[in-house]
Amino acid sequence: MSDLTDITELAPPPARVGRFPLAPDVIQPPGVPSWQRAGVALLLLLSAILLLYRDSALGMVAVWLRSDTFAHGILVFPISLWLIWRRRAELAAVPPEPTFWALLPLAAIGVAWLAGDVATVNVVSEFAFVALLAAATLAVLGIPATRVIMFPLAFMLFAVPTGEFLLPQLMEWTADFTVLALRLSGIPVYREGFDFVIPSGNWSVAEACSGVRYLIASFMVGTLFAYLNFRSMRRRLLFIAVSLVVPIVANWVRAYLIVMLGHLSGNKIAVGVDHLIYGWLFFGFVIMLMFWIGSRWSEPQSAGGLAHSLAIPATAPHTATLWPVCVLAAIVIAAPQGAKWLIDRSTPTAPVKLVAAPRLSSQWSAGSAFTQWKPAFRNPSAETNTVYASGGREVGLYVGYYRHQDAARKLVGSTNVLVQSGDTDWHPVGHGARALMVGGREIALRGATLRVTSTAPPTERGDLLVWQTYWVNGRFTSSDTVAKAQIALSKLMGHGDDSAVVIFYARAEPSGADALQSFVQAQLAAIEAQLLAARSDAR
């Protein structure tokens, strides 16, 4: 008995890598940087990213807190940390291998962040911010260790609030399906845009009815479910695809059922807030059913796979590479912020001076306002809204001028629209594009028809016809993408980011289009001169 006791006392304790206990037969190779040192280095780099790119991080947090659509973002980073913690034994068995080549993707991501920041495209800079966290992890830990936690790192991308660009298409599909299903049910429907009328009342497919919330939530949760329950890539991708299709179709069915409930009950149920509550209950049932079916084909982690993942590479890097990699990574991470500082210094910040009611040619004179409608463009540096009249025709001119743009003040953004969501007086019912020849050059315009609702004030008589264009660095364009690109290029070339939205509007009566065309062709040169004068004042 004493012999056994002596042998037990002399037995070596289980080997450890950092703070993670491993099986007794897993030995840390000599010369491998310890997990403690790699962890400290990684923590310093991640802290530097959070400090230098805090505007992007805080911008994401602000959206999580104010938007129900993206409230799930609050949970993404805690879930990612939990997923990494689940793999701690496998991760501890793989020694850190700091690598210099990871500085290349780190630099590319930094350039992408700078491009997004210069063009004030929040989604690009926020994706780049999250990608910087993953790239810094790759630089410090190397490929073998990063491969173990690849999914948790990729899962962090769900924290970026994006998806609102899908709203118009999802609303269109929902309206198409609902109207078709109602007609197949024998109910006559008159449709105009996203609004439709049935014998029992009026209905509208609003942004809340688009299903984008269901889609984003299902995509995130479905991806997590697939990772935790399946091992083959084929099954994972198939379930993720299902998690994208199911919420779209479920939202179509939800919209149809809501309208049918309202119609059959004489609009006593499924109206107002009720239809949102019923929608979430229906969506929750569909998602739970989808997960229950998916669980029937779950693939638990095999012991053989875990044992294979604990294998230690035969070779190990030298400890000396850790801190040089970290120092160079810190320089690469800081470089885009230095470039941003230089660009911001060259961007004028002086107040914009716009003439409140600019005098144009003698053909058109100042008139009185014929509508209370105004474009919903946020935080312009300066704006004017003037009405002009000529020969009984009336045309409104709105100019929103932007300078020193950032996340809160920018020319092109999802919140800059002709009519805000939830507006009870106006609904956009038609969109189109046109081009006019003005002074020997083609001017691209984006058109829309705004329908006045029955709840609008009595002073609002008839629909409005609206034409819109952007002016950036002396050029006109109707494209959001082109405008963004021109603003970014102008800032990079040191010309500043002065730009403006120019909107013409008139009553959409038979002569409305003719009045707008006559006004634009006669006055655009004078309008551009006003914009150029405002830009010159800042130089």
Image (cartoon, rainbow, N blue to C red):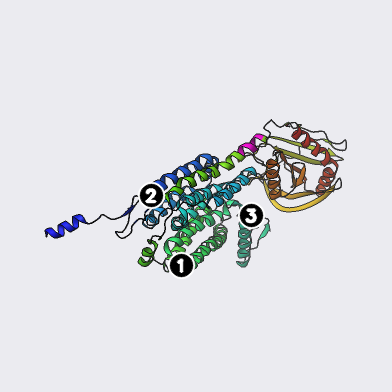
Tell me if residue 269 can be seen. no
Q: Which residue is mark 3?
A: 168
List x then y, in percent, for residue 300. 38, 65
Marks 3 & 1, CB-CB < 8 Å contact: no
Q: Which residue is mark 2?
A: 34
Q: Nearer the viewer, residue 75 or 177?
A: 75
Question: Could you tell me which secondary element the residue under label 1 belongs to?
Answer: loop
Cα distance between the residues tagged 3 and 2: 52 Å
User: For the point 58% across and 55% down, which residue is it?
Assistant: 210
Q: Which mark is residue 302?
A: none
Question: Could you tell me which secondary element the residue under label 3 belongs to?
Answer: helix
Circle 2 Cα neighbour tier, 10 Å, few/some/many (<14 / 14–19 / ≥20): some
List x then y, in percent, for residue 501. 72, 42
Marks 1 & 2, CB-CB < 8 Å contact: no
Q: Which residue is mark 1?
A: 232
List x then y, in percent, for residue 166. 61, 55
Question: Which mark is first along the chain, 1 or 3?
Answer: 3
Q: Which residues are magenta?
A: 340-345
Q: Quadrant of residue 415?
A: top right
Disc 2 residue type (three-letter): Ser
- From the viewer's perspective, is the residue at label 3 or at label 2 nearer? 2
Question: Which mark is first along the chain, 2 or 1?
Answer: 2
